[in-house]
Image (cartoon, rainbow, N blue to C red):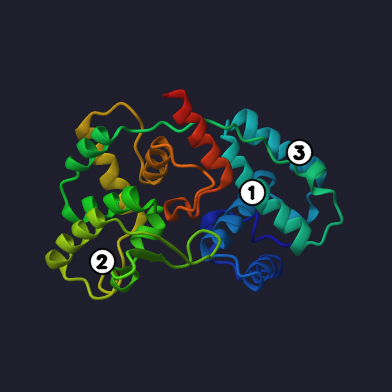
Amino acid sequence: MEKLFAAKPFLAKKLSMTSLRRRMIEDMQVRNLSSQTQATYVQQVSLFARHFNKSPEVLGPEEIRSYQVYLTNEKKLAPSSIIIAVAALRFLYKVTLRKDWRLEEIIPSPKKPQKLPIVLSPEEVLRFLACVRNIKHRTILTTCYAAGLRVSEASCLKVTDIDSERMVIRVRQGKGRKDRDVMLSPKLLEILRAWWPVNKPKGWLFPGDLIGSHISRFTVEAACHKAHQRCRILKPITPHSLRHYPEFWTIQDKLEVSAPNPLLTGLGAASVCRLTRHSRHLD
């Protein structure tokens, strides 16, 4: 019996990699899934196995249903968190274990509620950024806001990704492992040029504490949390939510959704529609 997925954390380190875990990792590697996705899927399958203290190979539809009920009613996880577990289990049973199941029925995915975003006014954004005391943290959060970047994308920017001739920022291997260009506003270029002499980065635009590394997502999130406490704005503020504000204010200025706009690149059609509905509510 495969025991690695069912092993407790302190025992898992002592056990050699079993064929089930190895096959699943190899299946993800040949499909070129990101390392973060691979780690997340392995973790979710491990939690599933530990819940029953059995290998996933001997667990079937009834156990899967019971586990989903447990996540929903006892753990009270958000639908977005359950969707991650569902994706991992679907991959395991469909790809690695090759089960000929109707996955939509055996491993259903919860419906994710659609909510309008809570948007900061430009004045609130300025007030928030003014409370970020470290210039590197303030610059990267400003970049997330002004260019609509995810924190993972902004933290991985290199100096050479800033193209002042074309006035674009090259985002390399963003969500879905896709490269894309986003608009570089003159104001953001001015802010980035003010940041460069402070640290004079040669590789990563926002270097981390370790030599040769870029700033971590957790460092940026911690800086955002501290600034949020200082500015005393009641609305929730995260690095991820900041990236939606430029799209909102562009749409609020009556830009047609169908018009080509680099700021909207990487934002799903559903997100654009939600932001549009939000703007109409404020008219």
- The local secondary structure at tag 3 comes to helix
Instruction: Say which amino acid is labelled 2.
Output: Pro
Residue for point 36% across, 64% down: 169
Q: CA distance from mark 2 to mark 3?
A: 45 Å
Foreground: disc 2 or disc 3: 2
Residue 279 image position (x, y, % from top left) = 45, 30
Q: What residue does disc 3 label?
A: 65
Q: Left or right? Give the position of 132 relative to 2.
A: left
Residue for point 61% across, 51% down: 44
The image shows residue 130, relative to residue 218, as above or below, that is above
The image shows residue 161, relative to residue 149, as above or below, that is below
Query: Marks 1 and 3: CB-CB under 8 Å?
Result: no
Foreground: disc 1 or disc 3: 3
Instruction: Say which amino acid is labelled 1.
Output: Arg
> Which numbered dot is residue 207?
2
- The local secondary structure at tag 1 comes to helix
Residue 222 image position (x, y, % from top left) = 29, 46
> Which numbered dot is residue 105?
none
Foreground: disc 1 or disc 2: 2
- The local secondary structure at tag 2 comes to loop
Residue 25 image position (x, y, % from top left) = 63, 68
| Depth check, front residue: 77 or 198 | 198
Disc with the residue nearer the chain's start (2 vs 3)? 3
Q: Left or right? Give the position of 164 relative to 84.
A: left
Residue for point 53% across, 30% down: 115
| Depth check, front residue: 27 or 196 | 196
Q: What residue does disc 1 label?
A: 50
